[in-house]
Each structure stands twice: as structure tokens, then as C-alpha cells.
């Protein structure tokens, strides 16, 4: 349920409404839309005195939210959310490039890649320190040492850091080093983890589950939003289908679909979505043309010797070419990159 | 198996090789690549005297074809195939727009739509006269009357006609009226039909089966090519997945994947791939950015009253806007539209 | 729409109702259910004078059919359909075994397999003479020669023959030799073919499309039924999913689902559904336990040398064991085998 | 890598081998198979002195494990694992029934259901206290209060308790009350949670991810086994496909497939696999016929008023009938129930 205040309502009017709502045992989520205050209600809404609330001073209307995802919906907030971190704005006029290796493998290789991606226009550095691996016998990442290396790369290059967090108890540690917490595809419905990042105030890059529908994806975003953290980036990274030539199938439809259903920024990960370096450039351009707000690309100074995901990783030269061509497409859709 | 002739080999050399191959009970498929004659061998290749053939005058090499699709493969022909029909070239520098209603519903509505799509830059008109419908109780199309209406629209507007053929015995009739025979998604593995269109010399737009892999798609193209018809357009139209917000999932990865595996032109159908008019424009731009050679779009002067597929059909104004925006993306990837 | 006549209504009453319905430009489909005549209406039902029809002599009620598949639905006919061919009844108390090689490879091997499967209790012989093959370069079957061999096997063993028909023009030829026409998974939505077998009166084994929903499957059956042929067997043969350890995923849920939605017999093909001989026996027993009316099993005297589908084909000994164990399960669910 | 000791090797021989292996920086997993000691090696196996190890006293052979899942594989242990908890043995001659409500809703309803399912032959009680819910606004379960109610039901009825654990920090609490820890489908690749239950010694019922392959499923089991906990039950609960008539598609193929790949017991959950109460009985019988070692069934005294999953929940009478019929099938495959 959403209470929309009139444009001319005063702050006192809104505060009074909130007080009344709270007295009913409900919590509220307040936002501003085009000069009107919106008050979202959370909790048990059975028996809500809609009539009485509608009659309070300054209230324009009390309306149900039709989507099961409420705070994430366009109904709730019709203007695009722009998430600003330092001087990087995600969801605005500029398409943001996030690039880096699958895993942090060591200080020298990471710094080398970081400098190179910065050079050709990336504004964020990706790299895993904690790695979710299908097999218990695969290498599981450098852990805190990896985080320290990422922080050093930020220090030197100014790139913002995106890195994965795998469990609630890792949230404080990773938050110390990272600018954006990544939730991986296998954790999209890890509710205790969604809860934990929802209570932090860190920007979160939420990857779509490889087996999850668009609506389930937005409901997972809703978990984070409803715990108080409004800084959510949605990341389409390919879904699992019967096609086996590619590792996953990029759901390009999801880009405009998420944009029509939600106000949150949408990032696309063409590396996991294709699993083949030879396809990444074309698919990246497609993502930008479809309206993506950012790209998340696996880049490594020496992909043939990457410790994981080498097949889908670009080398520096390929990434530079991708940036050049994707930028032209960004201009064609009225954006910079 | 493929015999590559030397650039300086004479026509007599090639003819002699073909004669020898034929004498082994094999048939041949001859093509030209960058000035070299290629002789593809079909039939039972066990016990092929590779040594002897390699030694014939003018032969550069005898090589196996690794892909199960042979004539369709980049190995067989590494330059892009450009299919020219009248003054329209598909697969070249220009991205081609094919537009029109799902079904031909009558003379007036079709002519109205045809004029309008021509006006904003379409070069081909789509529309079904024979309609494959999931239910036997749904309307099945105007049949030959629909073909006549399509032919009249071509007469008046100069648009080329793409329309569906559903069975081998319809091929001669539809060929009389159409410029391109469309094979629908449910017929991608209808082998007698592939055989029949393969023996005609008509251009064929082959739609990918909604749950067929890229390799199966190319093998179906191979059926047509191996029966002698080299005029094949591949059409990605979305695959069936678990996602239900959209009608299908456009496999955007397939665009560059088909381009790396095959020399054939690739068309994308964003209307069926999304099933939602609101998503068609964004996805069309994505397809062009990914390298598609053409778009196949459902357009109707009055979508709300279309007899079929109304939800995914654009009106004239929306199609005009799509053309304008997709053209900018085409320019960004070095093409016209 | 369905008109249900009273039990005591006379033939004249029914004939009069049919005449009236025909005079409205509608066609009818008449059947008998537990002594009541049911008159199904087909055509444009807008403006149907339900009131007037309800008042005719002998009419019990006029009721809408809610399912898009009408003649195939349990609503239309609530008792199980039993299809009798010679002395084999499919859909009744006995679970029927159909067995044989993927393809007819020659006279001797077929007769050998036929005798062996007869010996252990099969009542029908399967084997392909016309083979739909993914690649144009694969062997395409013995055609009419294969049909003749099948007929000879019937002559000798008394087994009924199930074999595939691939196009409308093959229907008369195959009908001369076969007892049951098989429509393959790739042809489930080949509407001209459904139409053609619908106009024959031959029993049809309709395989579910590997990419088709249960509802689409029943709509394809409806095509056959609505063209006048009521002798339809539904065959679940596995659907395409992301799982790659098996060739397909047997949709065991579909067995009771089809039984609750439709009155038609349900056959299961564990050979294609698994693609692995080692899994066929367990899955066959599961099918019988779930309520299948028959099994379609690939059996070959020498699977390692089968020309197609060898991996999923049982040898004679394995098939005998399957029959023995499946029979015990049939007894456990109150049936014979 | 696996070291197989000779049957006549002494404990000292084995201990010496283990010591040598440990001195290489590797850990070991020791098991007994038919009187021979098997020593599995974990860690970095590059440069392993296979020759030297093979020559140690009592060593029969040193062999590579071909499957990526090692401890879970039939290669590693070829006899079926039987997991005994109190007097219930899972994986042996008796098929085990686990039944109960989706969620624990209160003391009285749970006790009522518990007594009833015990009465007709269930040996384990299922019920969720911590509930993973797709929407943050859905009811999330009674938490510890629910566990206490489950414990009381065990006290009274003697049923063993299966209940879900959602995060590593819940493991100790849930272990206090439960006999088997359930890991839900969304957590199959929650590696910190797999790690945590792997370090406990509690029996674990691991549900297959709804879009995870059989091999990924076994790799997740391997996480638990490789952390020292050998008490793992695999649970097939339906996979996500394009079919929408049912909630999921039960992968019945997976039952014999898991049995051929692994020695671990296999449980089937027909309630989630179908999502429809009307299909549960038939599919349960299929699961038993296919070789399942147990069934996990949602049962509620009053399904229409269940707080979650009502559509797929059986009432007491239906469950009784299921038990009666499934028992007959169990006998037909040589087992009791």
C-alpha cells in the first residue's frame, strides 16, 4: 500500500501521516517523486483504515501496489534510480564499464589488468576474492588477501571495486574493502544473505539467478530494499537453457523488461552470458543498444593462463576494442560511455 | 570432404576432378571462394582415394569438413553470403527491414500497412496467408486469396513479399506469389518440406525451432543447401525457456554465434522473441548492434484489432520510431538501414 | 459447446437437434457416453441460440467446453478411451508393450528381433522405414522396402506394426502396411500432416513435441480428432531441458496429468526419454506405476551394431528382464501386461 | 586419487600410508569397502609420487578418480550407502516415508498431522520452521518455536524430524531439535552452508537445485562429504522446465541415474515436483518403481487452510491411500515400505 501526498502538502502533514501509520504497527518507507512525498507501508495490511488515512490533511490518495515487488517497482517510483558512488553515477546518462579478472590471482597481475582497463575507460574494477566454485576441489580464491590487493588497485587507479560476498558473516569484512558488494547467481535467493546486505548500506550488485524469472529477480531485490538498503544494481548474466553452444543464454529481453517493471539500474554481464570470448563484443554492444546502464566484463592480461573462466575472458586489446565500439553504440542511443 | 582447387587451376582441371568424383558415385557441390574453385563432395565417403584426388592437376588440397553442417559452414565458405533479390541485398552493408501483419486479413488493411511500412523504410512485406495455429479452432488464414493480396501490395509498393509455406505441396503455389518462402519455427525439422524448398530455387527464410539448438538450426539449413538451393536466410525468433514474462527468450548470443559458424545472413524477429510490443524497439536495436542483417517486425495499422498476435504488434507510429532509432544503431556499427 | 441428450431421448430427437445445429452453419461431432448421446458443435459459436437449443425435445443441457481442446478432454468424454486393433486393446486393463529397432535395417535382423520380442510378451512391433534425421547426410531409412519387411514380420509373428509417417503424401502408402501411424516428435505441430492422418481412419500414435507443453500436445491431438479420426494414442517421449546426462527428461508428471485432462490412452517411450539403455528398465517400471497404458521400447538383437540410436537400445535379454519386472509393477497397480 | 589397500593389509600398514600422505601436505579420507581400506587423497595432487606410494607395504593400487565428484561416486564406493538413524534405515530394503506440512503452523495442527501420518506408516515427520520465501512480505515461519513443536511431536510419536536450515549460523540450533537437516533447492549451491553442515555430523537431506544438473547435484553432495560428513541423502524434487501445467517437472530419469553414479540414498519429493495434489499419488508410485529409497510428501490435516503450498498438499485420507498403493509397488520391486 502506498500513500501519495499532495504536492502542496507540508512536511508536518507527512510526519503526521507517518505517525498514524506507525501507531498501527506498520513501518514506512518514505521517498520523493517529482516533488510529492510517497509513503510506502510495510507489515500486516489486513484491516488497514484506508478511508481514515485518505482523509488526513495533505493526502492525495491511498493506493494498493499491484506488483508483488513494491519498492522495486515503477509504480512505486517512476523515475530512474541513479546510484552515485564517489564520482561514478550508475543509471544516468553514462554507461558504466566494470572490468577485471574472474578471480584475483595475485598483486602484480591484478594491478596490470587494473591499469589497463582504466586506461581504456573502465570506471570500476571487478575481481573475486571469495569464489563460489561448483567443485569443492577447485581453488576457492585468495580471501582477505585478495581484498587487500583490490584495495591497493583502487588506491593506485581510482577504480571503484566490485567483489563478491558469499555469506552474511563476510559482509562486514568485504564492506571494508569494496565499493559494491556482488551477490552471485547462486545466491540470488540466499535470503539470510539478502537480509544481511539489506541491513548494510553498501551498494549491491545483485546477479540474476541462472534459473530465476524476472519476477523472482525483482522479489530478491525487494528483500534488500525492504531491509532498508536502496542501493541495488540488477545484473542480467544469462539464464540456463537447452542451448549448449554457449555457456548461458543472455536474456536480452530482460533489459527493457526490467526497465519497464523497475526503476533500478540494469547491468549486463556478457562474459558469463556467453562463456565465449569471441561473442562478448557483439553481445556487449547489444546490451548497450537495449538500454543497459553498465557492462560487467571479464578481462585478464593473459586469458590463456587465467586460473578460472579463461575461455570467456578478453585480453586487454580485445577489451579496448570493445570499449571503442560499444561507445559508438552508446552515442547512438543518446548516452556516453 | 572438400576439394580446394588452386587459384591458377583451369575450368578444365576442375571439370576433370568433378568427373572423377562423380565416377566414384558421389555428387558434388561447386562454389567459388576468392577466385578458387571449391568442390564439396556428398555421398558415401568411406574409402575415398584422397591420395589420388590430391594428385590431380590443379588440386591445392583435399580437406575434411569438421562441422556436421558442411555447406552452411564458415569452413566451407569464409566470406559472408549476400543474397540479392531484385534491388534488395541481404547480408551486405545494409540492414534490411521486413515488416507487416501477422496474417493477411484483407485487401484494404494490408495495403494500408504496406504503404505505411514502405514510407518509413521497410524493403520487404511480411504477412501470413497460410497460418500454422496451435488450435484447430483458430482461424487458419486466407490461403490463396491472401497470396493475391500480397502480390497486389508488391505491385503497388515495390516491397518484396515474405510469406509462409507449410507443406511441400504448397511450395509451387506460394512461389508464384512470394519473393521469399518462410519456414516457420514448428517446421524447422519438417524434412520433406526442407527437401521441397531445397529443390526450388526460391529464397528461404528459415526460422529457428523454438527449442532447437544452434547446431540443429544449421543442420536444417544444410538440408536446404544440400538439395541445391543456396538462398537461405537464418532467422532467430526466440527460444522457449522457463521465463514467462516474455513469450520467448531472444537468443541474442545466437547472432554472433551463427555469424562465426556460418556464412549465411542472419535475420532477427523481435516480435515473436518478446511477445510484447513494449519491448520490440529496444530488442530490435540490440539485434542490429549484435550484427543482424535484417529485422522481421509485426506491424499493423490497428494492432488492438489484429486477428492474431496483437499484443506483440507495433502500430505504424511505433514502427517509424523503431526504424529511426535502429538506423542510428546501424550507423554506429558501420552499416546503413 | 456440447449438447448432452437425455438418456431416454430417441435417435429422432438427436437427429433433429443435429439438423437444427447444421442449419446454423455449424458442424457436429456425435459420440455416445454411458448411453447418452453427446453432440459437439464446431464452427463460429457467436450468437448461438442456447436457450432455443436447450428447449428442444430430448436435450438434457447445453454446456460450454472450457478446455481449448474439446474432443480430447475429460469434460467431453469422461470414460477412458480403449482403442482396439485386432485383438489388442490399448487403454484397458492390459499394459501394452511395443518394441523393436529404431530403424528397419534389413529382413533378417528385423525378423530376428520381432520373434524375440513376441516371445517375451510384446504385442506390437516398432521400426522406422522413413526416418527423420537431424542431418541430411545421415541414412534416411529403407522406405517402402522397410514397410514390406515390417508387413512380413506381422505375417509371421502376429505382432501389430507401428511405424512413422513423415508427410501427408506418405499416409496412403504407410497405411497399407502399418497398423498404427506414428507421428514423430518433430511433427507434433505439422498441421497438414495432422490434418491428413485426421482424415484417414488409421490409429495414430502421436508423440509429444520435445519442446511442447501438455496443452499444446492435447491441441495437436484435437487436430486429429476434429478431422474425424478418434483413434489417437498420446505418447510422452521426454522433453528437452537443461539436463545433459540424459538425452531428454521424461516428464513423468505428464502421465497422470494427461489422464486427468483427457480420456485418450497414454504411451511412454523410455528409450528416447533417457537416451541410455542402462536407465530404460527403471524408467519403464516408473511409467507403468504412474498409469501408462503402454511402453514403446527400442530393442535390437545387436544394439552395438544398430545403425541408429544404439546407446539407448536394449538387447533381447535386457528387454525380457524389463518385461518380467514391469509386469510385476503392472500387477501392483491392478493391471496385466 | 584413491589408494586401495590389500585385504590382508594391517591397520599399521594403512596408518603408515596415511602418515606419508599427510607429510605431503594432503589430507585423507578413509573408508572401508568390503574389507579393504580405501584412502582418498585431497589437496594439490600435482607431482604426487604415485610410484613411491604404490610400493608401500599393503598397498594394492593407487588409482585416479575419474568423476569430478569423488567421495560421492560409485567408483569410490560401490555398495549402496545405508544411513541409519535410530531404528530407521534409509537406503536399505525399506522405502521410507517422510510426511508432514510445508510449515509448522502451530502445536495442535502439527501434532494432529504427526499422529495421523505415523498411523499410516510414515517414519519421519517433515515441517519447516525457517521458511525460504520468494517474497519478503510472505510469512517466514515460526523459527525456534517451530523447532520446539517438532521436537514435541517426535517425543510423542517417535517420528524422526526433518527440517530446513537456511544459513550456517542456524546449524547448531536446528541440530539440537532435528534428526535430519534439510538443505532447500535454493541453497544447493550455498557453499558456506554446505561447508557448515559438512562439518557437523548430522544427517543431511540435500535437495537438488531446481535448475541444477545431476553432476552439479553430486558436486554439492561432495562438498558435504569432503568436509567430513558422510550422512547425505539426495533429494530429487523436480526441475524447472518450460512446462507450466505442473509447478516443476519431476526428473524421474535422475533416480536411476543417481543410483548408477553414486552410492548415496535417493529420496523423491513428489509434492514440489508436481505442485498439484491430484498428481502426487501416481508420481509417488513411479518414484518407488524407479528405485527411490524414500518419499517426502506434504500432508496437512486441512490442506485448504494450509498457510503455504496448499495446492500440492494431501489430506490425511489421501496420504493413507498413497501409502497403501505405494507399498504394493514397493513389494513389486522387492522392497518393503
Image (cartoon, coloured by chain):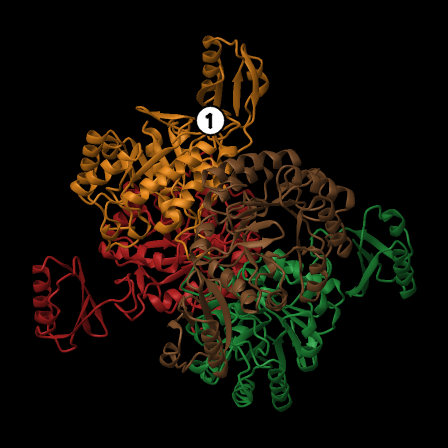
Chain colours: A red, B green, C brown, D orange
In the displayed structure, would residue D60 be above or below residue A183? above
Q: Residues within 10 Å of mark 1 (few under 14, many from 20)?
A: some
Q: Can residue B79 be seen in the rendering of this structure? A: no
Answer left or right for D200 relative to C295. left
Quadrant showing the N terminus of chain C = bottom left
| Rendering quarter of residue D270 | top left
Q: Position of residue B286 (x, y in %)?
A: 50, 68
* Subunit ID for the residue under disc 1: D
Q: Name the residue that disc number 1 marks.
A: D80
Q: Where A45 sits versus A136, above or below?
A: below
Residue drawn at (40%, 42%), measured in percent from left and top?
A: D284
C283, above or below A46, in the image: above
D12, D46: nearer the viewer: D12
In this view of the protein, can residue C236 be seen by the observer?
yes
Q: Looking at the rendering, which quadrant does residue A59 occupy?
A: bottom left
Q: How many marks?
A: 1
Query: On the rendered structure, is D117 left or right of C328?
Result: left
Residue placed most toward the observer, D222 or C131: C131
Q: Indicate left or right for B157 with D230 as reference.
A: right
| Residue D313 place in picture, x, y as percent | 31, 48
Name the quadrant of the C terminus of chain C: top right
Q: Position of residue C133 (x, y in %)?
A: 68, 55
Quarter occupied by residue C56:
bottom left
Circle 1 sits in a helix, a strand or a loop, which is it?
A: loop
Q: Is residue A50 above or below residue A230?
A: below
| Residue in front for this viewpoint, B274 or B13 | B274
Image coordinates of residue C306 in percent, x first then y, are 71, 42
Amino acid at each position: 500500500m502506498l500513500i501519495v501526498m499532495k504536492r502542496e502538502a507540508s512536511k508536518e502533514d507527512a510526519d503526521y501521516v507517518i505517525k498514524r501509520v506507525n501507531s498501527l504497527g506498520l513501518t514506512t518507507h518514505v521517498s520523493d517523486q517529482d516533488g510529492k512525498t510517497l509513503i510506502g507501508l510495510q507489515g500486516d495490511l489486513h484491516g488497514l483504515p484506508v478511508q481514515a488515512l485518505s482523509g488526513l490533511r495533505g493526502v492525495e490518495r491511498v493506493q494498493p501496489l499491484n506488483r508483488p515487488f513494491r519498492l522495486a517497482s515503477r509504480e512505486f517510483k517512476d523515475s530512474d534510480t541513479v546510484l552515485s558512488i564517489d564520482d561514478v553515477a550508475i543509471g544516468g546518462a553514462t554507461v558504466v564499464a566494470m572490468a577485471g579478472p574472474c578471480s584475483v590471482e595475485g598483486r602484480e597481475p591484478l594491478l596490470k589488468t587494473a591499469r589497463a582497463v582504466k586506461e581504456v575507460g573502465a570506471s570500476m574494477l571487478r575481481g573475486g576474492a571469495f569464489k563460489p566454485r561448483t567443485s569443492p576441489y577447485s581453488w576457492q580464491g585468495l580471501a582477505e588477501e585478495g581484498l587487500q590487493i583490490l584495495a591497493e588497485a583502487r588506491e593506485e587507479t581510482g577504480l571503484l571495486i566490485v567483489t563478491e560476498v558469499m555469506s552474511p558473516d563476510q559482509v562486514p569484512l568485504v564492506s571494508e574493502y569494496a565499493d559494491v558488494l556482488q551477490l552471485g547467481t547462486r545466491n540470488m535467493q540466499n535470503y539470510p544473505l539478502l537480509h544481511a546486505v539489506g541491513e548494510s548500506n553498501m551498494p549491491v550488485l545483485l546477479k540474476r539467478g541462472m534459473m530465476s524469472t524476472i519476477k523472482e529477480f525483482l522479489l530478491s531485490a525487494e528483500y534488500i530494499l525492504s531491509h532498508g538498503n536502496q542501493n541495488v544494481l540488477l545484473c542480467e548474466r544469462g539464464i540456463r537453457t537447452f542451448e549448449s553452444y554457449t555457456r548461458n543464454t543472455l536474456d536480452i529481453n530482460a533489459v527493457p523488461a526490467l526497465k519497464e517493471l523497475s526503476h533500478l539500474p540494469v547491468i549486463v554481464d556478457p562474459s558469463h552470458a556467453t562463456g565465449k570470448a569471441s561473442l562478448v563484443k557483439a553481445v556487449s554492444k547489444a546490451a548497450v543498444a537495449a538500454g543497459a546502464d553498465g557492462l560487467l566484463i571479464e578481462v585478464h592480461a593473459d586469458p590463456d593462463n587465467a586460473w578460472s573462466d579463461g575461455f570467456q575472458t578478453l585480453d586487454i586489446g580485445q577489451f579496448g576494442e570493445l570499449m571503442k565500439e560499444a561507445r559508438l553504440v552508446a552515442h547512438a542511443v543518446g548516452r556516453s560511455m
